[in-house]
Each structure stands twice: as C-alpha cells, then as structure tokens.
Image (tube, rainbow, N blue to C red):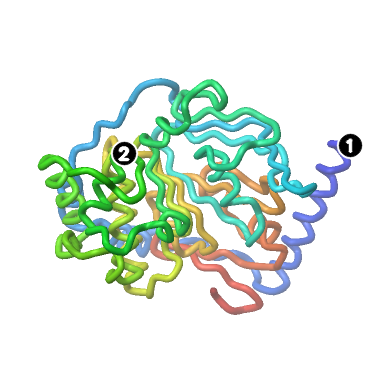
Amino acid sequence: MKKRQSSKKAEALASASRATARVNGPEPTPDPSREGMRQAALRPPAARDRFPSWEGSGVGSPALLQVAGLVVNRGGTAILKGIDWTVRRGEHWAILGPNGSGKTSLLSALTGYLMPTAGEMTLLGQRYGESDWRELRKRVGLVSSSIRQRMVDEEPAVETVVSGKYAMIDFWGSPKPAELRAARKLLGGLDCSYLADRPWGVLSQGERQRVLIARALMAKPDLLILDEPCAGLDPVARERFLLWLQALGQGNGRPGLVLVTHHVEEIVPALTHALLLRGGEIVAAGPVAEALTSDQLSLTFDAAVRLTRRGGRYALGFGGEFV
C-alpha cells in the first residue's frame, strides 16, 4: 500500500513539474549580487539593540518541538494524517499550505488547544500527556487571530504586553514596575512606544499586531509561533513586520520561529526551513532551498506555479502572473 501511494505521489509531482515547465519555462538562476543587497537592506541598524537580552530556558532536548505520527480526527474527518516533524534549536520554520491543509490545527495541537487522536508530541522537552501544558505555554509565544479577538477593549497596551508573561488574557492585578519597564522596552523595540497607554479598543490592525508581538516576547519564550501575522496588514505595515522578523531571526540566542503563511513573499532570509502541507499531509519538509521549489509548491496548491527568488525574497507565478 505504501509503495503504491509513493508511486502515485511521484506521478503527481512529475505531472506538476511538466505543467509548470509548459506554463512558465525553466527556473532562473538567482542573482547573488542582488540577493546580497536585499539581505543587507533587511538588516535594520543596531538590530541587536532593539530587544532586551534573551535567555530563555536553554535546557533540555536540542529539539524545540517534535511530533511523530500525529493524527487528528474530528467528526469523521481526518484533519492531520500521521505528521512527523521536528524543529531543532537554531532553526526557523515557515509553514505553507492552502486553506484546510491543517496548518492551524497543527499549531492548536502543539499548544494544547486541540487534543490529538493519535501520535506523540514533545514540546521543549516535555511530552504531551505527561506535563502541564498550561505551564508550558508560558515558554511559547503565540500571535494569532484567536488571541486578538479575545482582548479587552479597555485594557492599556502596556498591560496587554505584561499579560504575556503569565499567558493570561484580560490581565488582572497590578503590574510590577519592572514588568512595566520591560513591556515598554519591547514596545519601543517595535517602534510603538507611543501606544503604551492607549486602550486596545482604539488601536488599528497594524498597531494591535505589534502589541501582540511584544506580548508574545514578554516571557522571553524559547519558541515564537506566528499564525498568519500579516493578515489584514497594509503593504507598508506588512513590510515593516517582515523587517522586524528578519532582525529577530538573525539575533543570537533568540527564540525559534514558526511562521504560518499563505504567501511565499513573506518568507524572509532568516527563515531556514519550510514545511508544506496539503490535505493534512506533508508534501515537503526541510531546508528552504530544498523544500521550497516550483514542483513542491505546484503539488501543495494543486496548480502549475513557478517560484522565483530575487534579492533574498520569493514570488510565485501562476499562468504567467506573479502573486
């Protein structure tokens, strides 16, 4: 059975490759000089000074997270089908796939919000079912639309940031002076110090996203998960976020990054690996240069597409157009 499935996958991949070649022609060779210039432009001056020192736990397995044979079934539907995936310290991953491919379900399972049907999960050296996942979440920064929708309109941004230290929504109690200083410094690192005393309800989409990023960093997490963080951002706000992401990913001792996105142009050079999902299964996983190809993306999105790279950034062509 496995041999027949592998043969079918190989035939599908070959078919996508032929279709890609017919529509778009051969892939161009990247221009090293342009790539170097683009990477230099992505490094803001003194990026290492934009964020507080990072210590994290730095203990346990060299793997930040590991899943083996992960299966999630709901209502008779298979959402995840035997996922095997490992994120090691020093790696930064992008997760791509169409709607319904299982991206958000995978993250929900990893953070303990969705119970798996079968398989094993280990997060920061702790095995699922043998550890308190609520405490473990304090070591994982999470930015997602589900968190954004649960914030309290009256809460000042600086308190929203402080709440990240305790993995708490609607912070209660009085923040300590040291916590307020740390929260304001994080907001400053994201160029939004002016938002500190503004209530959540009056912030724009882009401003809320920056506040949530600062919140996710408040506990100095070992792993930072960004679930479609650019959704709803205008082009300028999106590019500013990607510049920040590049700076964070280049810093020594910073958290491991996992970025979930639909768009290859959001994969900055700091992201080292890519995981491609389709229908709850892995199409490709590994270093970006190996996993992110026209053939693999054509198979992932069930369409003949062509991937190009220019100046360290990617674009996706479909039917002669780029998206």
So how many labels did they put on this image? 2
Instruction: Decide which of 163, 295 is in the foreground and name it.
Output: 163
Q: Which mark's residue is nearer the viewer, 1 or 2? A: 2
Secondary structure found at label 2: helix
- Does 252 sit above or below residue 20? above
Secondary structure found at label 1: loop
| Comes first in the chain, label 1 or label 2 | 1
- Percent x, y of residue 304: 70, 68
Measuring 37% from the left and 60% from the top, which residue is drawn there?
A: 35
Q: Which residue is mark 1?
A: 1
Callout 1, which amino acid? Met
From the image, which quarter does the N terminus lie in? top right
Callout 2, which amino acid? Tyr
Quarter-of-image position of residue 84: top right
- Does 268 sit above or below residue 164? below
Quarter-of-image position of residue 43: bottom left
